[in-house]
Amino acid sequence: MKNHANSKSSTLRKSRLLGASVPAIMLASGMALSQAHASYDKKDDDRSESRSASEAVTDGWITTKVKSKLVADQEVSGFDISVETRDKVVYLSGEVEDQSQVSHAVEIAEDTEGVKRVDATSLRVGTAVDQMRDAVGMRDD
């Protein structure tokens, strides 16, 4: 009988130990999952920040490439054309002498690696009067 009593006592202790261990294991694994999830979320945040930074660098590089091509080109006055890039779309603004320079500037920008689209709606053709005022330094604007 003593053996039977010890057996029951041993089983009861195992049961209590197991009963206490299961919630502890579940709590620990839940915390581990929670930490893993938080770590994963942080990695996602880091990736999105990295993507934003890489997109900004790409836009900056596109602007630099386009502007340097325009300045080096003999057919357009790259100093009179402003270049801005957002989300790989190049925006040209400023003033050129004629429509062929607008077309040429757009072509230069379009031929630059990484450019999705070119918007030249703010690139205007100067009139003869504007050019004359520039020559004598009497520009109103």
Image (tube, helix red, strand yellow):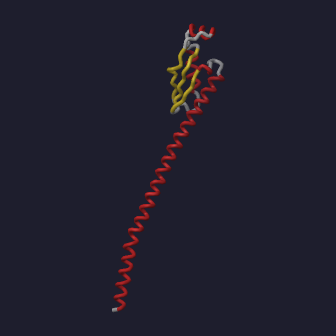
Q: How many marks?
A: 0
> In the drawing, does residue 9 fall left or right of residue 104?
left
Point out the residue furthest to the bottom here: 1
Q: Is residue 62 above or below residue 39?
A: above
Please name the residue shown 56% across and 17% down the image: 95
Q: Quadrant of the N terminus?
A: bottom left
The front one of 17 and 92 is 17
Q: Quadrant of the C terminus?
A: top right
Please name the residue shown 54% across and 40% down the image: 53
Please name the residue shown 41% across and 61% down the image: 30
> In the drawing, does residue 127 fall left or right of residue 5?
right
Which image quarter: residue 94? top right
Location of residue 97 in the rendering, given as x and y in whole percent from the top left corner: 58, 13
Location of residue 45 in the rendering, given as x and y in whole percent from the top left corner: 49, 46
Q: Is residue 116 above or below residue 5?
A: above
Location of residue 47 in the rendering, given as x and y in whole percent from the top left corner: 51, 46
Please name the residue shown 38% across and 68% down the image: 23
Location of residue 61 in the rendering, given as x and y in whole percent from the top left corner: 59, 33
Which image quarter: residue 3? bottom left
Q: Is residue 4 above or below residue 93?
A: below
